[in-house]
Image: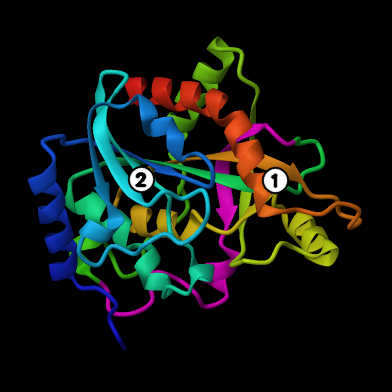
Amino acid sequence: MKLYFTEQDIDAAAQLIQKKTQIKPKVAVVLGSGLGHISDNLKQKTVIPYKEIPKWPLSTVEGHAGNLAFGVFEKREVVFMQGRIHFYEGYPMQMIGFPIRVFQNLDISTIIMTNAVGAVNQSFEAGDLMIISDHISFLPMSGQNPLIGPNMDRYGPRFPDMSQCYDQQLIKIAEDIALENGISLRKGVYFCLSGPNYETPADLKMINILGGDVVGMSTVPEVIVARQGGTKVMGISVITNKAKLDGSSTTTHEEVIENSAKASAKLEILVSKIINKI
């Protein structure tokens, strides 16, 4: 089976990054659609464009800047991943996990995943934040799993457990911070589809029946790779639109970007205080 990257590729990317910054974070934050500017408040900032990192896949979607931003955020060293890649961009599923493997090589022990999602749960509203309690890996279960292929034993077992994908201690920290700061925080299940089209009414009804509260086109493949390697994960979703199960509403990417920006202030408060408590 073709390998899209090797352990040597991971090492080369990590070595390039280490040459460009003195920051050695233990926490990484993956910023989803329209959320990249949260890293604007970094101090001692070093920005490394993805195109400068060997093998690093390039983002092609509006709202994903395509940089690693290293620096000090709320007194803690951190790296922000300003935009991610998606399976729908045409990348092999294995490549979705490459940035996570590089983070693991850099000894990053915790990753905060953020994303923009549509609400299937009809009690959720656009602008809400949701902690991911679990996910339904519909895309990986259908044969597009980032761990398919030869296993890199250095980064985890062949058959990794996924019973605790989202760290319960981190979830508790987030819930306490939200309560202390008057931030309304939902909690629910993320349903992963490939995109790039938005869902039909029948799709949405299926997701609702199967237990999905929100639906998105990212995150889950990254989480699978992170958990195989023993990295702790927290997931925070920004609800950018409320899906009408009867098909009476439409969704656009412009709407997603606009509503992400509106919710980003709440997300920045939450993420900054979580980083301080990790």
Left or right, residue 99 beside residue 140: left
Q: Position of residue 181 (x, y in %)?
A: 55, 12
Q: Is residue 192 above or below residue 144?
A: above
Residue in the picture at 49% in, 74% down: 144
Bounds of the magenta span?
Answer: 126-151
**Residue drawn 62% across the image and 30% down it:** 262
Side of 241 where 13 appears, left or right: left
Tag count in the figure?
2
How far separated are the C-alphas under marks 2 and 1?
A: 22 Å
Quadrant in which the C terminus appears: top left
- Which residue is labeled 2 in the image? 81
Determine the residue positioned at 85% across, 50% down.
Answer: 244
Residue nearer the viewer, 216 or 84: 84
Residue 223 x, y percent position in the rendering? 43, 54
**Residue type, mark 2 in image:** Met
Q: Is residue 3 magenta?
A: no
Can see residue 147? no
How was the colour assigned to the protein in this rendering? rainbow
| Residue 255 numbered tag | 1
Q: Secondary structure at mark 1?
A: helix
Label 1, residues with CA under 10 Å away: few <14, some 14-19, many ≥20: few
**Residue 106 in sight:** yes
> Dot 2 surroundings within 10 Å: few (below 14), some, or many (20 or more)?
many
Give amino acid for label 1: Glu
Task: Indicate left or right for 257 with 51 as reference.
Answer: right
Considering depth in this image, is 58 or 15 the residue closer to the camera? 58
Label 2 element class: strand
Q: Residue at x 56, y 24 (%)?
A: 266
